[in-house]
Image (cartoon, grey):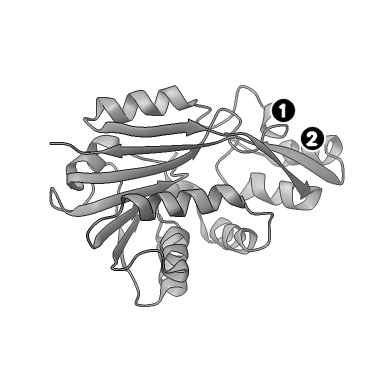
Amino acid sequence: MGNTEFYDENRANLRSSLLGSLPNSGDFNELFFRTIQQYFEGSRLLDVGTGNGYVISELLKRKLLPVISPWGIDFSQNMIDKARKNLGGNASLVLGDNFDLPFAENSFDIVTAKNVTRISFEEIFKVLKEEGYFVFREYGPKRGMGGVVDLFPERIIRPRDLSFYVEAIAAAGLEIVSKQAYEFRREYRKADVLKLVEAFPLVEGYSPEDRKLLENRLDPSVSIVSDPLLIVARRTR
């Protein structure tokens, strides 16, 4: 499933409205951005699957980077439009495919990826400079929504564990620097959970009948098991 197929204008708007109103990942978000700061030396950063520009926006807002020349790329025109609106002229944004990154080899000091639907680690290897770093955040088998997507066990999109990504990143030629799987719980309102499952690629072929199933199964307050992963890798040659 490509971003351009999933993130139509309605979903792009829904996703943007949700990101600022839901319980955030708290300490884990802070860890993600501090990790980027820790490994960023130089001035050129690429955020792949940038969506509405959230990662770049947070880095600029937090002033974690002393020097930054941020680039973002996404396969969805709707999300690029959102990113341009959110970031103004503070980043260079490109409509393009993560499986064919339109950048020269050895272009970036650091590449970031946060919950990206389509990603090629080989392409990331290509555009990283030697000794450049890749900071990768994703969710594990529960897709960050454990207890909800578990109702659709055969239809969860990308239910992969830490070892899957570690092996794939290493196979692309990158050296694993650190890797960690986490798990914690967050409390959501039922209405927000219903919007989340609709707004993000979590369940293949999600339908009105699936929504009715969730409406009947979920309590007004829902405890969600979140299982984020964080991997740092480096190009050494």
Q: Which circle marks residue 151 in the picture?
A: 1
Residue 138 horizontal side relative to residue 141, left or right: left
Q: Gap in Å between the C-alphas at discs 1 and 2?
A: 9 Å
Considering the image in quadrants, where does the N terminus appear?
top left
Q: Is residue 114 above or below residue 184?
A: below
Residue depicted at 47% across the width and 49% down the height: 32
Percent of width and height locating residue 83: 43, 66
Q: Closer to the N terminus: mark 1 or mark 2?
A: 1
Residue depicted at 61% across the width and 22% down the height: 154
Q: Is residue 196 above or below residue 139?
A: below
Q: Which of 73/163 is in front? A: 163
Q: Is residue 120 visible?
A: no
**CA neighbours of label 2 inside 10 A, class few (<14), some (14 to 19), many (20+):** few
Q: Which corner quadrant of the image does residue 146 belong to?
A: top right
Q: Amino acid at mark 2?
A: Leu
Residue depicted at 37% across the width and 27% down the height: 166
SS for tag 1?
A: helix
SS for tag 2?
A: helix
Closer to us: mark 1 or mark 2?
A: 1
Residue at the limit of the structure toward the front, as seen here: 38
Q: Amino acid at mark 1?
A: Leu
**CA neighbours of label 1 inside 10 A, class few (<14), some (14 to 19), many (20+):** some
Q: Which of 208/41 is in front? A: 41
Q: Is residue 168 above or below residue 19?
A: above
Contact (CB < 8 A) between labels 1 and 2?
yes
Considering the image in quadrants, where does the C terminus appear?
top left
Percent of width and height locating residue 115: 47, 44
Percent of width and height locating residue 20: 62, 63
Q: Which corner quadrant of the image does residue 224 belong to?
A: top right
Q: Which residue is mark 2?
A: 213
Q: Which circle marks residue 209 in the picture?
A: none
Percent of width and height locating residue 110: 28, 51
